[in-house]
Amino acid sequence: MPTMWLSDTQKIGVAFCSGGGLFLMGGVMMFFDRAMLAMGNILFLIGLTLIIGTQKTLAFFARRQKWKGTAAFAAGITLILMRWAFFGFLIELYGILVLFGDFFATIGGFASGIPVVGPYIARALNSLGGVSQAANGETV
């Protein structure tokens, strides 16, 4: 039987992150429901910790170039818990873009293989992550 590249703990972490994303989307669709947004944040952080480990998670959020994103993410969660869900979500979204903007190019690379809409998704993720088209080999 071939071995998978994810351990069982990492698979559980992927499930937690997926559940966190679903709760965050549900919280936005329910007009910024505070409980759903808080649950989505908790599930996302638990899932991230299970996927990459506790030490790497702490090292990721404590990196000097990620301090602005970490502060915005923490402030957003705090505002959500203090019943300012809309403003908390906006600040948290900014923190997520700063923290995980580097990964959007990687996700865009995978999404570009989708037959019809793939190139458009990849272009949107690259522009969202701040990757210039010249870095992708295209002319500007």
Image (cartoon, rainbow, N blue to C red):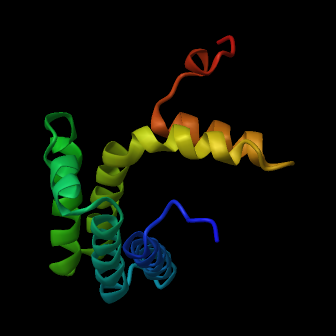
Q: Position of residue 140 (x, y in %)?
A: 64, 12
Residue 33's place in the image compared with 120, above or below, is below
Q: Residue at x 52, y 80 (%)?
A: 29
Q: Residue furthest right?
A: 116
Q: Residue furthest top?
A: 139
Q: Quarter of the image for the N terminus: give it.
A: bottom right
Q: Position of residue 137 (x, y in %)?
A: 65, 15
Q: Residue furthest front?
A: 1
Q: Residue at x 21, y 69 (%)?
A: 77
- Along the line of sight, which residue is nearer the eye, 31 or 132? 132
Q: How many marks?
A: 0
Q: Position of residue 4 (x, y in %)?
A: 55, 65
Q: Residue at x 46, y 73 (%)?
A: 11
Residue 44's place in the image compared with 96, above or below, is below
Residue 68's place in the image compared with 56, above or below, is above
Q: Residue at x 48, y 74 (%)?
A: 18
Residue 62's place in the image compared with 137, above or below, is below
Q: Residue furthest bottom?
A: 35
Res 135 quadrant in image? top right
Q: Position of residue 103 (x, y in %)?
A: 45, 43
Q: Is residue 92 left or right of residue 59?
A: right
- Along the line of sight, which residue is nearer the eye, 40 or 6? 6
Q: Is residue 68 left or right of residue 87?
A: left
